[in-house]
Amino acid sequence: MSYIVDVQSTRRYPLPFARAVAAAANEAMTFESVSNGAAVTLLLTDEEYIRELNRQFRDEDYSTDVLSFPAGEPMPGDENLLEYLGDIAISVPIAERQAAGKGHDTVSELQLLAVHGILHLLGYDHLDPAEKKTMWEKQALILKKLGIGEIQPTEDNHDE
């Protein structure tokens, strides 16, 4: 499958970070059999900007590791357009801290967050135990395909 993954950043981050999140997004979309040609935007940013996004779009005044913004359903007559899944914002400084706290590298944490974000765009959630189990299992399988061992998302990942 071929996908369009547009990686942007609000600061200069190491190039391997952008490559890693793009690879993770591609792997997650392949794993979930997303339509060929689907597109997503990933934003690598800092704590201040992700906090502002969280405040503006979720009415939550804290920084977090990852936010997902689904694009919604395509409009009638858009059958020939690319399927745009939505946008994902990832806080690099929070990812760095979480990786250090869990004893793995930042690239693996960024890939986990990219996969997590893609799954949210595809409708997965972790609000109840059954949904969480499904989402966490899918994350683990996708990360394994990326060559990453068992790492779990940080659940209390905000500064209030």
Image: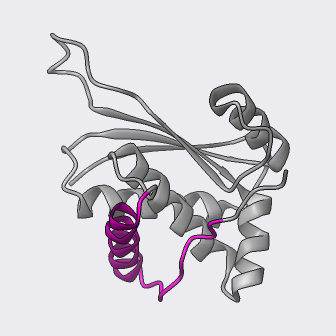
Q: What percent of the width, then of the height, locates residue 159? A: 83, 55
Indicate yes or no whether the magenta region holds residue 19.
Answer: no
* Direction from residue 73 to residue 87 in the image, left or right: right
Looking at the rendering, which quadrant does residue 77 occupy?
top left
Q: Which residues are magenta?
A: 128-155
How many circles with numbers are drawn on the protein? 0
Indicate yes or no whether the magenta region holds residue 136.
Answer: yes
The residue located at (33%, 66%) in the rendering is 130
The residue located at (78%, 33%) in the rendering is 52
Where 58 falls versus 26 (above or below)?
above
Q: What percent of the width, then of the height, locates residue 31? A: 25, 64
Does the magenta stretch mainly form a helix, a strand or a loop?
Answer: helix
Q: What percent of the width, then of the height, locates residue 89? A: 61, 44
* Direction from residue 42 to residue 32 in the image, left or right: left
Q: In terms of depth relative to the viewer, which is nearer, 4 or 99?
A: 99
Looking at the rendering, which quadrant does residue 92 occupy?
bottom right
